[in-house]
Structures are given as structure tokens and as C-alpha cells.
Amino acid sequence: MSPQELLAQPFGNFAELLRLHAARRPAHAALVQGERRITYGELDEAMDRAAAALRRDGVGPRESVAICGANGIEYALLFLGALRAGAVPALVPPSAGAESIARMVADSGAKRCFDEAMLAPAAFEHWVQGASEGPIETAPTPDWPFNIIYSSGTTGTPKGIVQPHSMRWIHMQRGPSYGYDESNVTLVATPLYSNTTLVSFFPALATGGTVVLMGKFDAGAWLALAARERVTHAMLVPVQYQRIMARDDFERHDLSSFRMKFSTSAPFAAELKRDVLARWPGGLVEYYGMTEGGGTCVLLAHQHPGKLHTVGKPAPGVDLRLVDDDGREVARGEAGEIVGHSGAMMSAYHNRPADTAQAEWRDASGKRFIRTGDVGRFDEDGFLVLLDRKKDVVISGGFNVYPSDIEAVLRGHPRVRDVAVAGVPSLRWGETPVAFAVAEGGQDAQELRDWANARLGKIQRLHAVELVEQLPRNAIGKVLKRELRDAYLRRVGGA
């Protein structure tokens, strides 16, 4: 069977798919980092050695192995080798504090844990030395856990999201529809422990292409690398697009090889999308969804330039609904919490049945949906307009105020480079909005507040504007509004 025939099957073994690519094109580059290039033949052998080393260390099928490190070839080899062994990579963000990392590793039940030092090339080679006696084979079923991803933790203790093999297989099968084939070159500049990255990483390898790994993101270095490697695909979060497009030397880099660019994980401003479409060759796709799966929307921005304020339409096979606070579906055109059902959904939160139940919504027939925690509405053409995180909606005087609407107004100010709006307690209104703005020099906070309030509705008006040097973000670009709110309240108290 050819790799293409296997990928066309309703379900298949990803590790077997990579072995087929290795047999067909053993000298083709699979992984690139700096001057290092790992061919598919070398990748296949390295996966067997890592799988054998895990088995030697007592890690069996469906048992977890924790990985906590930065992007690198050894990280990828361990991840892929664990899959060949039938093990479950538990992806722990190294940016978390030591106590949080320890809790995540303990929660995963990992039989083996790899940190940054153990993923150094020499240490990794020493670990696998002499472990493999030949090809390793396993036969996962669709319900087997593929990996555990720990949530970004923007709202508290990270939860382990168990993604099954069936979910990942669907992600891989989407690849060819976005131009992934054996000639793809995909640049990865977001962490391998994030689902943001993996929805691009796995389709690239599943179709037999090349993945170029980048360490710490730098916009100038990224542009140079993309031009040098003739990159065809890339996943970037909105703040990375912002930094790339702001560079004075953007036009001097040859990006003509691009077929498709992707974005997800954070709000993507319509004006920024428009700039990317105008100046950067290739298509632009925005994914809206969650690591937990279920409710995925896709905006083919290059095909729908009049819908850049939306996150697109539900992806094929996705049933997306909007529900009110009582769990009832809302009328067309009304706002509600987004819930979604598809073949690509998490199995559960690891060891958290109560949290799993809270994350689910079922319709009258008992069909299982995943709650997104986001509020949105469908426009007249069926495109989803994302309003805000449900927890971020400001309830002022009994009315819902969506921070995203206020942020859109503030972004229209010529000196505002970045902005986030959060609700703070108010004795008079219950809650009231405060803006945190990154502005160019000379901007006065009170003047900016007055400028915005003159353009906002009465219930939207800002209590205050705080000027900050930068907005706190997690590793995949999400603004940490809780940190902004807490710092503000410590300084000034309630409103």
C-alpha cells in the first residue's frame, strides 16, 4: 500500500505511514533544524530505536511518557518514537513553574520523563544506544490515546487533554486539501507541546514533506529562514504575523514559494489579515477551535475577503450550535456559547471526570458536544462572528459588553499598537471595562479614553485606560487578561 492509499483510509497507523514514506523516499528530508537534516530513512530508524528504548525502560503501549522541552529534533524523535511504541506522549510546557510541571508530570502518570537536558543530542544518543534490535510494530485502535496536551493554564491549573488516534488521523487527512503533499516544506515556529503546532506538524509529515524546526521566534530570522528553505506552509499565531508584517525589510524576502499560511489560538484582527493577503503570496487560513476539539471553523481568507471579521464556517463534518446560559439553543442571529461536535474530539480531561462533564453539552438526542467557552453569533451567510470568551464578557449594569468590540475601536487609533480590554469590579455597575493599551510615545491615557468613549456606546464606555509597555502572553500568543486585571486591582482597587 502506498502512503497516499493509507492516508485515504477511514483510519490508519501514523507510525506505519512514516515507515511507508521511508521505504519510498529514504533520502528525502523529514526534519531540518539549522544545519542538521534527518532523512525519512534516518527518521524511521530513529523512531525504532526510541521505541525500543522506551520499552526497555518499562513503557508499554497506552502508557505515558512526559516530554518537557523546547523545539528540537530530539523532541520530535522522542514524540514520534513513543507513537511507534504505542506509548502516549504527555506534552508538558517548560515555561510553567517547577511546581506546576511536577503536578502535570504526576497527573500524566508518566513511566518516564524527559527534560531539556535529556533531549540534548549527546544525552539522547546515549539513551537510545543499543536499544533497537529491529523494527518495532504496534497496532493502535482509533480510541487509543495519541497524546496528552496540557492546557495553557490561562484560567488556572492546566488540565490534561487526551486526544485519541482518531482525532489526529482526521487532522492529517485534511492536509492534501490545503496543498500538503510530498513536496511541502513546513516551518514550525510555535512549541511542539501545543496543539497549534501539531495541527500543522502532523499533516506535513503524514504527506511525506519536510518540517523545518525553529527555536525561539524572531521575526527577522523567521523571514530569512522561510526564504532560504523555500517554505510552502507555516502556522503562526496572530502576534507573530503582526511582528513579521511590521518589519521594514519584509518586502526584501522572497516568499513566493508559499502555498498556504495558517493561524489559530488568538483573535486575528481583520486589518492584519487584510495586510497579509495584500503583501504575502499564497492563501491564508484561519482555524477557530480548541485543543479539546469538536467545534472547528475555517476561514479561507483568500477566498472570502469580505468576511475577514469572522472566523469562517464550520469545517466539514462539524456540527456547531449556540446555546444560552440554561443550555437552550438560541435563535439564528442571536449570540450564544459555541458548542461543537465532530469526529475530532478529545476523549476526556485526564483524571478529571467532573471537569470533563462540565465541558460537555448534549442535545435532545444525547449527542455529545464540547463547550468552547466562547460567545459568538452566525451572520446571514452562516459565517461565525466571534464575540468573546464567555468568562471575559463584562456584565455592566445587567448588559453584556464584549471586550472584542471595544478593542476593535481602540485599534482604530493611529497610535495604538496592541490592546486588551478586561472587566473589573464596580460598585455602581457590577463590572466595568478597562483597557490596557500599548501605544506609541507621547500618547496620554486620559486622551485615549476620551477618544474611545466618544466612539463607543453608552454601556461600552471605558472606566480607564492603562498604558503598558507590552501585553503579557503565553507561549502561543494568548493575552493573559487575568494578569492585567489582577495587577490593576492591586494598584487601584475596585472601580
Image (spheres, rainbow, N blue to C red):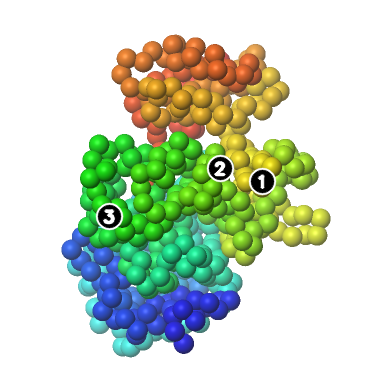
Residue of label 3 = 226
Residue of label 2 = 307
Q: Nearer the viewer, residue 299 or 392?
A: 299
Mark 3 or mark 1, earlier in chain: 3
Q: Nearer the viewer, residue 106 or 429?
A: 429
Q: Position of residue 411 (x, y in %)?
A: 45, 27
Task: Give neighbour class at mark 2: few <14, some 14-19, many 20+ (Cα, 10 Å).
Answer: some
Q: Amino acid at mark 1?
A: Asp
**Which structural element holds mark 3?**
helix
Q: Amino acid at mark 3?
A: Ala
Per the rendering, the mark at residue 381 is 1
Task: Give neighbour class at mark 3: few <14, some 14-19, many 20+ (Cα, 10 Å).
Answer: many
Q: Quadrant of the C terminus?
A: top right
Residue under the image location 43 percent in, 53 percent down:
283
Q: Is residue 376 above or below residue 448?
A: below
In the picture, measured across the screen, residue 287 lies left or right of residue 215, that is: right
Q: Position of residue 374 (x, y in %)?
A: 61, 42
In contact (CB < 8 Å): disc 3 and disc 1: no
Badge nearest the viewer, 3 or 2: 2
Q: Is residue 364 above or below residue 83?
A: above
How far apart are the alpha carbons under marks 2 and 1?
A: 10 Å
How far apart are the alpha carbons under marks 3 and 1?
A: 36 Å
